[in-house]
Amino acid sequence: MGTLSRYREDPRLKWAGLALIAIALLALPFVLAMAGTAWVRITNLAILFVLLSLGLNIVVGFAGLLDLGYIAFYAVGAYVYALLASPHFGLHLPWWAILPIGAAVACLFGVLLGTPTLKLRGDYLAIVTLGFGEIIRIFLNNLSEPFNLTNGPKGIATIDPIRFMGLDFSSATRIGEFALSGTIKYYYFLLAVLVVVIVVNLRLQDSRIGRAWEAIREDEMAARSMGINTTRMKLLAFAMGASFGGIAGGMFSAIQGFISPESFILNESVMVLAMVVLGGMGNIWGVVLGAVLLSFVPEILRYTVEPVQRMLFGRSLIDPEVIRMLLFGLAMVVMMLFRPAGILPSAVRKRELSTGREGDGDDA
Amino acid sequence: MVNGLTLGCVYAVVALGYTMVYGIVQLINFAHGEVVMIGCMVAFSVIVALAPTGLPPFVIVGAGIAAAVPACMAVGFAVERIAYRPLRNAPRLAPLITAIGVSIVLQHLALLVWSRNIIAFPQIIELKLFHFGSSETSAAISNIQLAIIATSIAMMAGLLLLVYRTRLGIAMRATSQNPQVAGLMGIDVNRVISATFVIGASLGAVAGAMVGTYYGIAHYQMGFLLGLKAFSAAVLGGIGNLAGAVLGGILMGLIEALGAGYVGDFTNVCLLDRFLPGFSAVCEASPESSLFGSNYKDVYAFIVLILVLVFRPSGLLGERVGDRA
């Protein structure tokens, strides 16, 4: 991305660079598929996490509100999709109808959570959102009685895949000699959504709203005296972040075909937060980078650490999942201590996070 | 009621840890729940190791607590050094994020050491029930519950003595009022803050050991919910206020214990059927089921927390503004 910024001076070079990246991204699944379909699936999940991180970035990065229950909105989106497109209620609405509904419902939940809590100071907000995330999970877990709404801990299975112009995304399509697997189709679908979301985010950041958020983040009192309706703006940030989470959740539902409350535990919220923090709060490209890094590094570790352990000790001593969480935790601590603005810091955020500190401008 | 009181005492002791740290550095110590968990785990290990020796049960549990306290003190000290001190003058978001990071790391280290399974505490203290009435069905209190309540009260009293009667306590109160001026008065602010974390952690250690012996189980993720509830308790009582934390903790325990029982009864489907149509089919199928049964007991703490934050952010005893609610 560093080279990208240099090309920004010349629009023609910029477009050429973007085209190169686009071609690389379009070819990526076929390259990955050579290493194994699992990697394409991992990439898909990584894109989902990028989407989630971008949503959380609106709340944490742009508006400076620490939300620790973000995964709740993801869960809401996922469950809306699952309920409206599965045999559970016998409903089979098309995806283009459900995703907006999921986003709207998640947005409603965002407002629901935001209204009573946004008057609070940062750390209170963090803990209330954390509690909110747990409440949603507990409800999902228990709403099988007396009405079976969520099917409890068993989760909802056989969720409809996405169908688009006669293409079924769950199975492979043959075009002559050439087979396009379902995973690869999902990759393109996710990529398309991702591009839209990134463009929306970029425009949002430079809009009146984005600037208002920035002002609130820097100094709420000053922002208010400048005539910004801070409560409404903060609520808007919550609602927007939540709707992005809802959309990502819906797609997660469609891709996995099965969801249960276990997919939406606190650790997931923390993971998304770690991605935002690692990449650089408030910087869209930084957040993308953070999400991609934290999605892939653990998977790579899974494929390397385990064989190494088996070779050295004859068995797997440390579960890769544990290593992953340790890594997330450590990443958060180390980043905050040594490079509080993230790998790719946003200009303003960097200034803010390094007040009273020196010498954290060099690479960590 | 007795269950609630016992639980409340545990919450109160944990809440004291939050409140002390908050009072002095205005930070929520997100890792405190994990400190409690570590205390519980260490106590567990010691108790398991000593259980076959045939020593009197209270000595074994005492040894467990005695081992947990220094372990947690060390953890508390390390957390403060690593995660908080370097960021003391940074914006609020930064230490909050490191604290979450630290708590994730602590959780998974505990997972590595004590496995991811639910651990069963050995039942070494023989359960004895003391009934309030003469009949066997009257309300009863067990010896474990008595011991927990007694220990908690002793610890709270000890803490109050420490804060209001010793030099360190004076230094702590001075630092919480104004760290700069306290520094000018010759108080080693860093040491006082360290001490606060360590004392809070040792309270957490005892609370952890008590929770373990009370429920008989431990889990590497237990600290999260416990910490959240205790924090809610601290907020309920007015964060930064020691008496408030005690009051909030006991109230929180009672709310949880009574809420789990009564809200379940009030939302019983058959009862609802009399007021709202549509429940009759469910009522016939399972007359015992209720809309919000004890499955939801963990939700009450959060609801209380949100209500308090909305209507009385300073808590019941916070800042001494107005009357008690």
Image (spheres, rainbow, N blue to C red):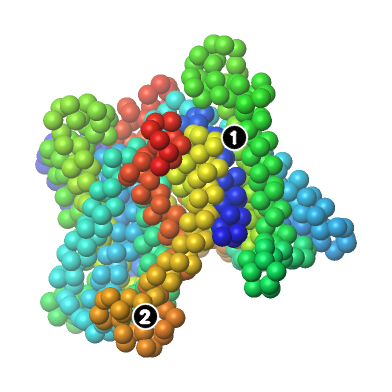
Above or below, A1 against B172 in this view is below
- B175 left or right, relative to A209: right
Q: Nearer the viewer, residue A97 or A178?
A: A97
Find residue A222 and report its image quarter: top left
User: For numbered disc 1, what is the local secondary structure?
Assistant: helix
Q: Residue at x 43, y 39 (%)?
A: B324
Q: Position of residue A167 (x, y in %)?
A: 18, 79
Q: CA distance from mark 2 to mark 1?
A: 50 Å
Residue B299 in sight: yes
* Number of other residues with Cα within 10 Å of mark 1, as a class: few under 14, some 14 to 19, many 20 or more: many
- The spot of residue A251 in percent (x, y) is 26, 67
Asked if residue B213 is positioned above or below residue B193 in the image, the reply reads below
Report which residue position mark 2 lands on: B270
Per the image, the residue denoted by label 1 is B197
User: Could you say where residue A193 lies in the image, as x and y percent from the top left?
Assistant: 20, 60
The residue depicted at 20 percent of the width and 54 percent of the height is: A197
Horizontal arrangement in the rendering, residue A285 relative to residue B128 (left or right): left
Circle 2 crowding by C-alpha within 10 Å: few under 14, some 14–19, many from 20: many
Q: Quadrant of the N terminus of chain A?
A: top left
Three-letter code, disc 1: Phe
